[in-house]
Structures are given as C-alpha cells and as structure tokens.
Amino acid sequence: MLRGMAARLQIDLIADVVCPWCYLGWRNVKAALALRPELEARVTWRPYQLDPNLPEEGVDRAAYMEAKFPDAERRRSAAETLTELGRQAGLELKLAEIPRAPNTNAAHRLIRWARGAGRQDAAVEGVMRAYFTELRDIGDPGVLADIGADAGLDRLTVLDLLARGADREQTAHDAGMARELGVTGVPFYILDSRLAVMGAEPPERLVKAIDAATRERLAPPMQ
C-alpha cells in the first residue's frame, strides 16, 4: 500500500441471492476489506440470475435440485462442503431444508432500492439470511417487504413497487448484461473496473487482489 495517498476502491459484486457461494463471497469480501481498514472501499451488488426462467411464485426446491443435479451423492457432498465453509464464515446454511426455489428478480429489485437509500448491505444480508437460514420464501412480496422494512425501507412502499413491477425489466436487463459480458459463474468481482476475480475466494486471497487493484490505482504515471 502506498503511503500518504488516499486509497479508494470500487468493487462490483455480480451475484445471485440463491447462490450459497455468493453468500460466502459476500461475507468473504467484507472480511477481506476488514483487513484493510484504511481503504475507502465500496461494494456494489450487481444482479445475476442463475435461472431467470423460473416462475415468479417459484418451484419446490428439492425437486428442482434433483432435476438439475441428478447425482444424489454429489448433491450431498456439495451441501456438506458448503455447510462447513458457511460455518467457518459465521453462516448457518440450511441447504437441505430450503422449501422454495424462487425467481430472484424481485429480491434483486429490493436490493436495488435499498442501495438507493444507502441500505444495500442490510438488504443483502436480510435477503440471504431469510433464504438460507430462516427458510423464508424470498419470492413472496410480503416477505421481501418485511426484509426491506428491517433494512430501513418503508414496507408499504416496497409492496407498492413490487406490485407495480417497478424496475423489473431494468433488473432483468442488468442481469442479462452480465452474461453478455462473459460472466458464466458467480460470485464474480470486478475491482475498480481493472481486475476480475471469480469464485468465493477466502478473505486472504481476496485481500491480495484488493491490494493489487489498489496499487495499480495509486501507482504514479510513467514519465
């Protein structure tokens, strides 16, 4: 880190709220930034939909996962790995108990509105905790309105925006743009529009990428 110069960093995190790796990635990037308290960093959540074709009311998650990943042993092993990694990150992931696989457009819209109100982080945490730990249906407008209220938004306003379909097309467009840019797996980090990192890397690896991006930003111009 260069001394005597302001260190700022923009991190765009492309992720989906029903992706357990994304929950880990969100927590890990926050842990990495905690290792650099002198850095002025902003993490902006960018929407990605693993399955934008799901109906708004969602589907039974157990049946959906069985159809998507037919190998039961691989599903069990992956769930065990994720549960342990989640525990290490301070998360309780109840993967086998999640009842619904929702269309995530509405949840991403809630996060969008929360970001506009300066409450993005609370909304992201609220949505993913509701899904992975509290086993709530985050495709349900009432559930999302409650999460929004807990994050500091007006509950009735959130319900009204969801009912009117506000920002539905824009959110779908933003998620589609990520695919057009070549993002095929999430979480996907873009650091200062310069450096890309894919996957739920542990904090010690993410901080190396953060340092690299910061050095590049602060490096003096070549003479």
Image: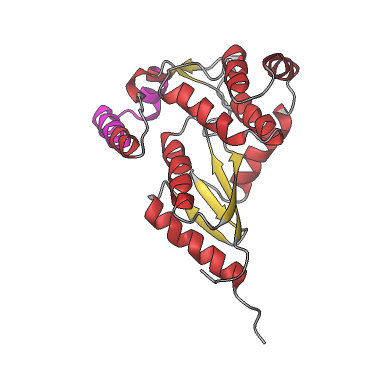
Residue at image position (64%, 27%) is 110
- Tell me which segment is drawn in magenta: 63-82
Rendered view: 182 above or below 144: below
Magenta residues, dominant SS class: helix
**Labels in figure, total:** 0
Which residue ends up furthest to the bottom in the rendered image?
Answer: 223
Q: Position of residue 115 (x, y in %)?
A: 66, 36
For residue 178, what is the image quadrant?
Answer: top right
Q: Is residue 121 magenta?
A: no
Classify residue 148 as left or right of residue 37. Answer: right
Q: Position of residue 62 (x, y in %)?
A: 37, 19
Residue at image position (56%, 45%) is 13
Rendered view: 26 above or below 73: below
Quadrant of the snapshot with the C terminus: bottom right
Rendered view: 156 above or below 29: above
Colour scheme in use: secondary structure
For residue 4, what is the image quadrant?
Answer: bottom right
Classify residue 192 as left or right of residue 212. Answer: right
Residue at image position (67%, 39%) is 174
Pick the front one: 101 or 86: 86
For residue 163, what is the image quadrant?
Answer: top right
Residue at image position (35%, 28%) is 92
Q: Position of residue 208 (x, y in %)?
A: 44, 61
Q: Position of residue 42 (x, y in %)?
A: 60, 49
Q: Is residue 67 magenta?
A: yes
